[in-house]
């Protein structure tokens, strides 16, 4: 990893002499590793512990796989080591090396490229509160202009509302819970018809994990009607009001005991699918598993719009209809594997092309100047779970999106959403870098340890044998040539 990083940066400086590089080992002068680690933690750069197997003995090494890019008074932290759940150190390094160029290019882009495009974070329809989307929004601010936008004036000033909305390049709908009026829908529809882009994080069932932590340990999952069905149907997809139950899922953490004896234990929780990537699209290439909660399956419908499933549940999943009572008591039951025959359920879909207005051949909710029945070429990504963008809180402060403070796992939610926004806003340079494939050959540690003596003898004996043979042959032919008979 160190060698690959050094080689990449040397190539960068060979092309651009304005870039200067310093390589620093924070432990080179024998400073206390724990003190250095705490300093890195305070800067938001967490050290990594690496298991090393040498001569059959295991040891643990503390490493600091980070870079900092500085330009003027601005600086960007660059993580070099990519975490992936359930993989070996070799696989983790291989995955990280593939992302090196992207990591540095992304950081340099943040430092030197001026922000131009604007994103509207939609409010007013019961979307997630600001603290729960704070981490992702703060990340987006490094690339784009961000502003909240409400459709509250859609009833009184619809034309003005639409004109204001079209000033934005992309809208983000983060888990709306209140139904849209026809005026609001028509404004959203015409925004898309004029080439606007959208990231939908919408679910058609009402259920929250927190609802289970009551005296009964159960809650009802109910259908949720946002009055968006006709809009989505016209665009070429449908979000079904059912839940995805998936054997490949993230755990739920439950507490037992009290006071100092409290213990937090993980249990399999099949309503939190960990998604797989059925293809190698740049948005999801080399991506960590994305964690969903109470997700709904997405159906793609036949129309001229190009569609690609970005994320789906595992083949061992099944849809479950609602209303349905969900209880923590299911943790004590062994799942019936014979019922998990639903196959992969689409949970995130990319749609690109020219969309047909949902109000084509229909009476419009209000008169609109230049209303369009067919869009310009545009795109949208629909995700059937609003919790994908939801970060956890600790003492009221937002944690990094994708980090689960109860298990310590970091999922790929943040990277997936950032790639999605970059792609929709045509930041193709960075996306293309992400799609590169690099393969590194690693030494088989177990085999090397088992055959250590064999190769030591071989490496010592063969050169000696060749040397003796050469010396004997040289001496023999020398005598034969120069000694008189």
Image (cartoon, rainbow, N blue to C red):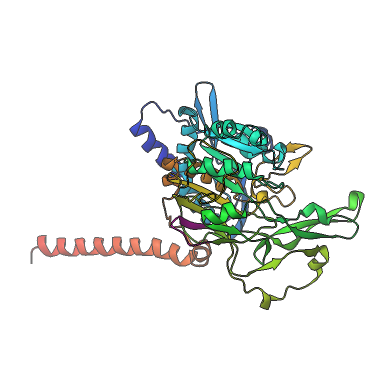
User: Closest to the observer: 145 or 300?
Assistant: 300
> From the viewer's perspective, is residue 127 above or below residue 480?
above
Q: Residue at x 45, y 29 (%)?
A: 113
Q: Is residue 2 visible?
A: no
Q: Residue at x 65, y 73 (%)?
A: 340
Q: Is residue 458 visible?
A: yes
- Residue with the most extreme bottom position: 338
User: Closest to the observer: 257 or 269?
Assistant: 269
Q: Position of residue 101 (x, y in %)?
A: 44, 42
Q: Position of residue 454 (x, y in %)?
A: 45, 67
> From the viewer's perspective, is residue 314 above or below residue 369?
below
Q: Is residue 222 magenta?
A: no
Q: Position of residue 156 (x, y in %)?
A: 66, 33
Q: Residue at x 46, y 45 (%)?
A: 375
Q: Residue at x 80, y 64 (%)?
A: 325
Instruction: Say which quarter of the image contains residue 328.
Output: bottom right
Q: Position of residue 465 (x, y in %)?
A: 32, 65
In the rendered view of the protein, which quadrant contains the C terminus?
bottom left
Q: Is residue 318 left or right of residue 103?
A: right
Q: Is residue 305 magenta?
A: yes
User: Closest to the observer: 385 or 165?
Assistant: 165
Instruction: Say which quarter of the image contains residue 44.
Output: top right
**Region of the chain picked out in magenta, as a range:** 301-309
User: Closest to the observer: 51 or 450?
Assistant: 51
Q: Is residue 241 left or right of residue 428?
A: right
């Amino acid at each position: 990893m160190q060698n690959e990083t050094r080689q990449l940066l040397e190539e960068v400086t060979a092309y651009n002499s304005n870039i200067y590089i310093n390589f620093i080992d924070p432990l080179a002068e024998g400073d206390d590793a724990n003190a250095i680690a705490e300093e890195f933690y305070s800067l938001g750069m967490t050290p990594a512990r690496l298991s090393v197997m040498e001569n059959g003995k295991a040891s643990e090494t503390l490493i600091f796989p980070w870079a900092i890019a500085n330009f003027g008074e601005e600086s960007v932290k660059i993580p070099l080591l990519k975490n992936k759940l359930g993989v070996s150190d070799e696989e983790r390094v291989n995955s990280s090396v593939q992302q090196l160029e992207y990591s540095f290019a992304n950081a340099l882009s943040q430092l030197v490229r001026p922000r131009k495009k604007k994103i509207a974070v939609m409010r007013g329809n019961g979307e997630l509160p600001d603290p729960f989307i704070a981490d992702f929004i703060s990340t987006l601010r490094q690339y784009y202009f961000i502003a909240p936008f409400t459709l509250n004036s859609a009833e009184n000033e619809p034309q003005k509302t639409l004109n204001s909305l079209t000033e934005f390049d992309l809208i983000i709908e983060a888990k709306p819970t209140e139904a849209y009026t026809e005026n609001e829908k028509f404004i959203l529809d015409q925004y898309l018809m004029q080439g606007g882009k959208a990231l939908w994080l919408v679910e058609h069932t009402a259920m929250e994990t927190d609802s289970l932590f009551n005296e009964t340990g159960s809650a009802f999952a109910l259908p949720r009607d946002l009055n968006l069905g006709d809009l989505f149907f016209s665009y070429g997809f449908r979000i079904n009001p059912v839940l995805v139950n998936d054997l490949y899922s993230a755990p739920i953490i439950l507490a037992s005991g009290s006071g100092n004896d409290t213990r937090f234990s993980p249990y399999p929780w099949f309503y939190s699918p960990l998604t797989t990537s059925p293809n190698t699209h740049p948005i999801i290439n080399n991506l960590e598993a994305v964690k969903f909660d109470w997700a709904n399956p997405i159906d793609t419908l036949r129309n001229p719009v190009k569609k690609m499933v970005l994320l789906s549940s595992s083949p061992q999943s099944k849809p479950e209809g609602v209303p349905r009572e969900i209880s923590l008591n299911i943790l004590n039951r062994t799942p019936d594997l014979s019922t998990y025959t639903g196959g992969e359920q689409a949970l995130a879909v990319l749609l690109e092309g020219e969309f047909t207005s949902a109000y084509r051949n229909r009476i419009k909710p209000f008169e609109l100047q230049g209303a369009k029945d067919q869009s310009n070429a545009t795109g949208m990504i629909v995700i059937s779970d609003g919790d994908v963008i939801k970060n956890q809180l600790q003492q009221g402060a937002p944690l990094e999106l994708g980090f689960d403070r109860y298990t310590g796992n970091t999922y790929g939610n943040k990277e997936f959403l950032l790639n999605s926004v970059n792609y929709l806003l045509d930041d193709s340079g960075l996306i293309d870098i992400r799609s590169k494939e690099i393969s590194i050959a690693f030494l088989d540690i177990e085999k090397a340890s088992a055959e250590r003596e064999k190769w030591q003898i071989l490496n010592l004996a063969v050169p000696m044998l060749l040397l003796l043979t050469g010396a004997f042959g040289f001496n023999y032919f020398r005598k034969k040539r120069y000694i008189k008979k």
